[in-house]
Amino acid sequence: MILQENKHDFDVAILGNGLSGSLLATILGKLGVSVVLIDGEQHPRFAVGESTIPHTSLLISLLAEKYDLPELNDLVDTKGLATRVCSTCGIKRHFGYVYHRPGQTYDRTEGLQFGTAAREENHWFRQDTDAYLHNLAIHYGAVPRQKTRVTGIEIDKSGVKLQTSAGEEIRARFIVDGTGYRSILAERFGLRENPTRLKHHSRTLFTHMVDVPPFDDANNPLPISYHNGTLHHCFERGWFWVIPFNNIPLSTNPIISVGLTIDPRRYPKPQMAAEQEFNEFLERYPSVAEQFKDGKAVRPWVSTGRLQYSSKNTTGYRYCLMSHASGFVDPLFSRGMFNTVEIIDALLNPLLEALKTDNFDEEAFRPIDVQQQLILDYNDNLVNCSFISWDDFDLWNAWLRVFGLGTFLAEFHLMNGMSDYSRTGDPSYLKGPIKNPIFCEFEDPDYKEFFKTAVETAEAVEARTLDAKEAAKRIFDLADSYAFPVPIRKDALVRARWVKEEAELTENGLGRVRRGFRWALTTPHTRDLVNSAQTFFRWCAHQPDPHLLASNGSKPATLAEPRDVAGVSR
Ligand SMILES: Cc1cc2nc3c(=O)[nH]c(=O)nc-3n(C[C@H](O)[C@H](O)[C@H](O)COP(=O)(O)OP(=O)(O)OC[C@H]3O[C@@H](n4cnc5c(N)ncnc54)[C@H](O)[C@@H]3O)c2cc1C
C-alpha cells in the first residue's frame, strides 16, 4: 500500500478538491508532478454548477487527448458518463428559454430553444462527477487531505508553507486555489475588488427537488421537449432554472435541480425562508407554478446574497486562483465550468515550465490573469444585457442572437483548431488567431465590435434613451450586417464527435449548413435554434417556424427579414 499520510512536501498544493482542483490534480499527477489536494469537506458532497456546454466538453476532450487521459472523455460522453462514472446525470440537448409575464400563462410563440450541439451535453450530478474526478486524481498520484482546513499560509522565496487544522505543516513550490467564492487566497492576500466592478446584480435561491414534471410538453411547438435540456423560465429581471437529471433511460436519479435568480435591486431579500420566498414567486407566474405544483425539495434550500464578485489579481508569485475563486457573474448561459476548464488549460504550460526551471516569476502567469479578467467582463455584459432585455420579448429574442453568434463561432473555430491539432500534433493550432479578444481567442475577429455595439444598444434601453423594440430591430440589423463566416468543417465536426466519419457531408452540403446557420442566427422568425435535420432544411429555405406563421400563412410582420450581405452567399 502507498502511504499518504507521512508525505508533507509537494510540488503543487491545490486547495479545493471540486471540479477545478481534482481535474488539475489528475493532469498534474499523470505528468508525474507531486500534488496534495486539500479540502474542508469530504466526497461525496453537494456542489452547484451542473449544466455543461459544448465548450466545456470540447476542452475536456482536448485535455483527455493532450495528456493521454481517456477517463476524462467519460465525463463528456453521455453513455460513458452513465456506464463508467455514475447513473445519476441527465442530458442537455438545448438551452430552452420560455418568456413569462406576471399573472399570465406563457405565450407559446415566446419560447426559444438554442441547440447545445449535434451531440448531447450533460447535466452533471456534481456530487458524483466531482467524486469520480477526485478519485481519478488520487489514482494518478495526488495525495488527498479531505476534512482538512488550512489555518495558515506563507509564500516566500523558499516556497509555500501551509498549516492545517490537523496540525500538519505542508510545503509546496506552488499553490493553486480552487476553493470557489470563499477563496482562501483572495481572503489571505486581500485580492477581492470591493466593491466589485461588475455591473450585473443577482442573488439566487436553489435546491434539488423530486416530482417536477416536464414543462408543458402538450403545448410545446418546438421539436424537442423542454425536459431534454436546461430550461430557463425568464421574466422581468430574473429567471428560474430547471435542470433534470432524470431525462434519459440510463439515469436512475429522479432529481431535478431548481433555482431562482433575481435582481436584488428589484426584488430585495425578504425576511422569510427561501422555500416560502420561492413559493410566493411562483404565484406571479402561473405556467411556472403549474410545473412546480407537486415539487418537493430533497435537500435544504440555499439562499445567497449578491452573487457577483471579482478580484484585482488572480495570479501572483507562486500562486494562481482558479476561475471560480477569481470571480463569478451568474449561472445564466452555463459558462462557469467552461471558464474553469479553460483556465486549467491556460495554467498548465506556464506551471510545468516553472516547476522545471524553478522560476516562479509572476510575469509568466500574468496572461492567465488577463484572460480571467476578460472572461469576467464578457460574462458580465452578456448576463447584464440579458436581464435588461427581459423587459421585452423582442429585445430578448435579439439579445439571444448576440450570445449565439459569439458562442457558435468560437466553438467552430475551436473545433477546427482541435481537429488540426489531432491530425498534426502541432500545439500552435490550439492558439486562436485573435490577438486582442473580448472573451476568447477563438472568437470571430469582427465579434468584438459587434458585441460592443450590441451592449451599448441594450444599455441604452436601461438608461431609457432607446425604446426596447427599436433596440431589438437595431441588434437584428447589426447581426445582419456582420459578415461572420460560419467556419464549419467536416473533419472538425468528426473530431468533436458531432457527426460520424462515414456521414455524407459534401462541401455543397456544408455550404447549406453555413447559410442555414447564418439565416437562423440573424432572423427574428425562428425560435428553433436547434440543429436537427428538419430544422436545417427550414433554415436553408429561410422559412419561419410553422407556429409563428399567422393563420393566413403569412410571416410575422414585426421585424424585417435579413438582407443579403456582400461576400456572404446564402
Ligand atoms: C448558483 C450557481 C449555479 C451555477 N451553475 C452552473 C452551470 O449550470 N454550469 C456551469 O458551467 N457552471 C455553473 N456554475 C459555476 C460552477 O459552479 C463553477 O464553475 C464550478 O463549480 C467551479 O468548480 P471549482 O472546483 O473551482 O469550485 P467549487 O465547485 O465551488 O469547489 C470548491 C471546493 O473548495 C472547497 N472549499 C471551499 N472553501 C474551503 C476552505 N476554506 N478550505 C478547504 N476547502 C474549501 C469546497 O468544499 C469545494 O470542494 C454555477 C455557479 C453558481 C454559484
Image: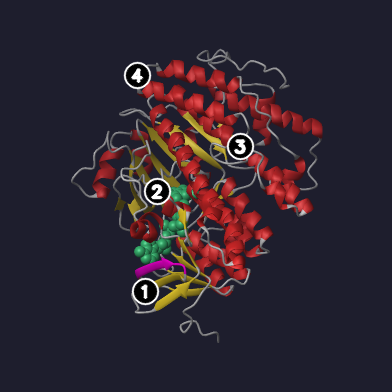
| Viewer-nearest of discs 4 and 1 | 1
For mark 1, give the secondary structure: strand
Count of picture labels: 4
The first of marks 3 and 4 along the sequence is 3
* Quadrant containing ligand 1: bottom left
Quadrant location of residue 509? top right
The alpha-carbon separation of the residues under discs 2 and 3 comes to 24 Å
| Viewer-nearest of discs 1 and 3 | 1
Name the residue rendered at 51%, 45% in the picture. Answer: 370
Magenta-colored segment: predominant secondary structure: strand
- In the picture of the structure, the residue carrying the numbered disc 3 is 443
Whether residue 486 sits left or right of residue 246 in the image: it is right
| CB-based contact (under 8 Å), mark 1 and mark 3 | no
| CB-based contact (under 8 Å), mark 4 and mark 1 | no
Q: Is residue 244 visible in the rendered structure shown here?
A: no
Residue nearest the viewer, comparing 69 with 86: 69
Residue 156 highlighted magenta (yes or no): yes
Quarter of the picture containing the N terminus is bottom right
Q: Which residues are magenta?
A: 151-157
| Colouring used for the render | secondary structure
For mark 4, give the secondary structure: loop
- Say if 304 sits above or below 467 in the image: below
Whether residue 505 sits left or right of residue 186 in the image: it is right
- In the picture of the structure, the residue carrying the numbered disc 4 is 464
Quarter of the picture containing the C terminus is top right
For mark 3, give the secondary structure: loop
Q: Amino acid at mark 1?
A: Gln
| Viewer-nearest of discs 2 and 3 | 2
Name the residue rendered at 35%, 33% in the picture. Answer: 237
Residue 358 placement (x, y as % from top left): 57, 67
- Say if 373 sits above or below 466 in the image: below
Q: Amino acid at mark 2?
A: Ser
